[in-house]
Image: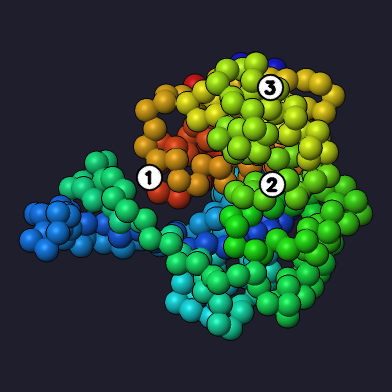
């Protein structure tokens, strides 16, 4: 076992003593499963015989669930609509034992729902056929933003890390981000961000975790080998004024760039014969942030996040990783 892995293993023992606030877009992940039976006469499409429905925590809610599964105390902060999807999300939080004190309900707002239609005869062979997204019309109302700010201020008296999970639905407004930075200055909390569309506006954070495609788009550098990945990673590090940039590279593992000049390329953990990448980025940022919050080095945090990502992509649907699974993976 490498030194970074030994350090990561030591961090796992501290997870239960840490508090993480996850701020961002709370999403309901819906899976509809069906067995293909024939081709429709109306159009050249499959007809599926419905078999079951599954609802899981998605987006920032999945990031919060990952923190919770790792054994830390988690406080999700976000907005839902007064609708069936929002009610299901609250039920899932309560069922998992996750606090809903930071969840604000807005009348007239649509809770984001990602519905995946899955076809196949058995769980091991089910494949996603199409995805249907139901999305809110815009950013939360000013009164909702005020409520989110109040929850953020009230619930962060003792916080070790703040994870920003931005899926483009407007929850993390400029005012909320300013408050997050103020809290971090006051408490010394780690601030990490995963933003699907607006990463450049989240400057001055501890860490950012883009994937390779996002890195290429943000920097304009074609990333086709380690040299160009490092060039783009260093550019983004400066642009964000961040301490760390962790780039997820799919089957090629991860790349870690630190403000002090250190660079590390980490090979993929396990096999590249993955089952499902849905929500893997949530697992990575949750694990990475927790290790940093425990005092682990960036390389230790990235190494354990890489292992966690390798474990979770072998599971179907939006999933989490437990400390026991991490220990087992490290033992292997």
Q: Identify the residue under disc 2.
A: 199
In three-dimensional space, the C-alpha distance between marks 2 and 3, rounded to whole angstroms, equals 18 Å
Apparent side of residue 20 relative to residue 322 in the rendered image (left or right): right
Q: Identify the residue under disc 3.
A: 230
Q: Of 11 and 311, which appears nearest the observer?
A: 311
Q: Residue at x 67, y 50 (%)?
A: 198
282 is higher (above) or lower (below) than 299: below
Q: Secondary structure at mark 3?
A: helix
Dot 1 alpha-carbon crowd within 10 angstroms: few under 14, some 14 to 19, many 20 or more: some
* Foreground disc of the pair 1, 2: 2
Spot occupied by residue 274 in the image (x, y as percentages of width and height): 39, 32
Which tag, 2 or 3, sits closer to the chain's start? 2
Q: Of 192 and 91, which appears nearest the observer?
A: 192
Spot occupied by residue 202 in the image (x, y as percentages of width and height): 76, 49
Q: Residue at x 37, y 56 (%)?
A: 131
In three-dimensional space, the C-alpha distance between marks 1 and 3, rounded to whole angstroms, equals 32 Å
Q: Identify the residue under disc 1.
A: 316
């Amino acid at each position: 076992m490498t030194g970074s892995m030994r350090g990561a293993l030591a961090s796992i023992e501290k997870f239960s003593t840490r508090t993480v606030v996850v701020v961002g877009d709370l999403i309901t992940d819906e899976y509809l499963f069906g067995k293909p039976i024939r081709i429709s006469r109306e159009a050249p499409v499959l007809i599926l015989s419905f078999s079951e429905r599954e609802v899981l925590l998605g987006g920032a809610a999945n990031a919060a669930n990952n923190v919770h599964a790792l054994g830390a105390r988690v406080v999700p902060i976000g907005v839902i609509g007064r609708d069936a999807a929002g009610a299901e999300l609250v039920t899932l939080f309560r069922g998992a034992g996750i606090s809903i004190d930071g969840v604000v309900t807005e009348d007239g707002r649509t809770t984001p729902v990602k519905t995946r239609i899955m076809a196949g005869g058995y769980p091991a062979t089910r494949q996603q056929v199409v995805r249907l997204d139901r999305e809110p019309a815009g950013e939360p109302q000013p009164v909702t933003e005020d409520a989110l700010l109040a929850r953020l201020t009230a619930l962060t008296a003792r916080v070790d890390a703040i994870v920003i999970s931005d899926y483009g639905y407007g929850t993390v407004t400029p005012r909320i981000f300013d408050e997050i930075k103020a809290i971090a200055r006051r408490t010394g909390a780690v601030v990490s961000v995963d933003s699907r569309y607006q990463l450049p506006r989240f400057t001055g954070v501890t860490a950012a975790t883009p994937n390779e495609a996002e890195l290429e788009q943000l920097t304009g550098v074609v990333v086709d080998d380690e040299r160009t990945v490092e060039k783009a990673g260093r550019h983004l590090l400066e642009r964000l004024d961040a301490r760390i940039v962790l780039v997820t590279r799919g089957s090629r593992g991860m790349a870690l760039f630190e403000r002090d000049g250190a660079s590390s390329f980490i090979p993929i953990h396990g096999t590249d014969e993955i089952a499902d990448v849905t929500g893997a980025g949530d697992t990575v940022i949750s694990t990475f942030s927790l290790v940093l919050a425990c005092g682990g080095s960036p390389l230790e945090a990235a190494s354990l996040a890489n292992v966690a990502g390798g474990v979770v992509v072998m599971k179907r649907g939006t999933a989490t990783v437990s400390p026991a699974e991490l220990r087992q993976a490290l033992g292997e």
